[in-house]
Amino acid sequence: MKLPQTLRGGAARPWIVLGLSSVFLGSAALMRPTHAAPAEQDTAKLNRDLERSVGKLFTKYCADCHEGSDAPGGFAVDGLDSVNDVLANKDGYHKAAAMIRTSIMPPDGMPMPDRKEVLQMVEWLEAAIISNRELVDPGRVTIRRLNNFEYANTVRDLLFVEAKSTAGFPADSVGHGFDNIGDVLSLSPLLLEKLLDSAEAIAEEAIVVSSYTEEVYDAGQMTVEGAANLREDFVHFYSRGTAAVVHEFKEPGSYRVKLRAWGQQAGPEACKAAVQVGSGRPVVLTVGATRDKVGEYEFPIEIVKPAKVPIRAEFTNDYYNQQANKDRNLAIETIEILGPFGRSKNLPKSHRSIIYSNPIAGQEIQSARPQITRFASRAFRRPATSGEVDRLSLIFEAGMFLRASSTVSNSIRSQRQAQRASTLTDGSSPPDSPTSSGQPCRIRSLLIWPSQAS
Ligand code: HEC
């Protein structure tokens, strides 16, 4: 049993849905403070740097004017002996850093620090200003969700789908005149519901699920005419006759017609079956197989529009030699229609960008991996790690399992996948949770750093 359709569609959807949805499962890990070096060490080093080099730059470029109690703007550098002096006039030095960086200070016409010196002063000032953690404690940081506009833009950039679905979203609250303030962008149950629905709709629009099927008609389903009759599990042609089925092709594309057949071989040539699809030219198959080793014979067909098409197989070269007691008869066990194959020509860009190559039958999971990696890396805006891809692949496998389990003939494979899928569902942490990697939720990063408005 092959499952090429899974990669083309169905199984890929769940992880997109999951990815889009997971933005709302807030995580404290995301908000870990970033600077963590011991403050005392910082200060000692900064003081050393001031004494050795940076202090000289302030003296050289600023002290001419910014000295004493009547220094311009009340800003004087002659008292600058340590980090503490910066902290005592944090606002003044903050301004100074900005002015040096933008070359406003020193004023035009004065000796100018070169680029390296500018950086030296600015970086030193900035480090000194934040060296006192108490002063820079940012307090609580709100996890900010995307507003509706950002969400739509992000979906567009990532999936090439216009998220019309935000139309039904509750309007974003406005704070201080802006609609992107984390503190007021709450997540109501209604919005969460809408977002989950939207994720489903977007996944459906982004990925076209192929209707690939393998339809097997057995002998009992065939309409038999002429010198033929139904035996146990095959149609037996004792002379010229036909066996026909009608197949509904639901979409245009390339298909294959496959016969499982064998013959009672006799006479100068092997059995021949002429197979006619609709009103097309019959394709003559030479059925050389015998009952102990049934053969499979197939040929490709192109279907241009959806239709119900009769497929007729005819035994054309009956042979009977009474004297020698030689009789050539044909047996057809099944007529199978496989397809459509290959990629439809009009797949949307979203689909092509996510699923950029067809899977190799039997190796869907391996084929999916690089595609999952690429998608995840785009969503995270950095290369996805193999651990992350492992977890996403598991979701893909679970999707494959769900599809496969609806097909009876797939028991062995299903079992294996069921085991894997159960590790996915039984595991205490969801595949994308911060605890499972010790890292902030990656898939969310894109939805937290929104796309630019177009
Ligand atoms: C040629 C004299 C001169 C030099 C050199 C000079 N400044 Fe100034 N600076 C001024 C004057 C004059 C003002 C007041 C401008 C105003 O108020 O419009 C000023 C204003 C400032 C202010 C704003 C103070 C406030 O709160 O309004 C800062 C900060 C400052 N300078 C930093 C520096 C630094 C740092 C340097 C050296 C890299 C420097 N300046 C070099 C003359 C100078």
Image (cartoon, rainbow, N blue to C red):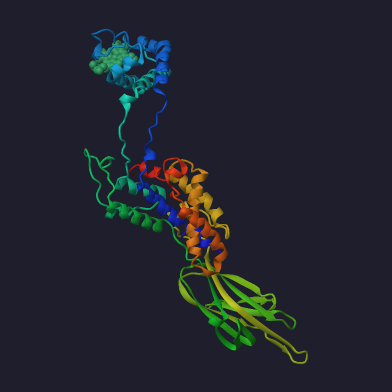
- The vertical placement of 126 against 381, above or below, is above
Q: Nearer the viewer, residue 376 or 149?
A: 376
Measured as percent of width and height from the top left, residue 445 is found at 40, 42
Residue drawn at point x = 36 percent, y = 13 percent: 82
Q: Residue at x 64, y 81 (%)?
A: 331
Residue nearer the viewer, 336 or 103? 336
Whether 72 is drawn above or below 350: the answer is above
The quadrant where ligand 1 appears is top left
**Where is residue 74 shown, x and y percent of the image?**
24, 13
In the rendered image, the quadrant that contains the N terminus is: bottom right
In the picture, the quarter occupied by the C terminus is top left
Q: Residue furthest right?
A: 324
Considering depth in this image, is 184 or 264 the residue closer to the camera? 184
Q: Tell me the quarter of the picture where residue 109 sits.
A: top left
Residue 416 position, x and y percent, is 55, 59
Residue 8 lies, in percent from the top left, at 49, 59
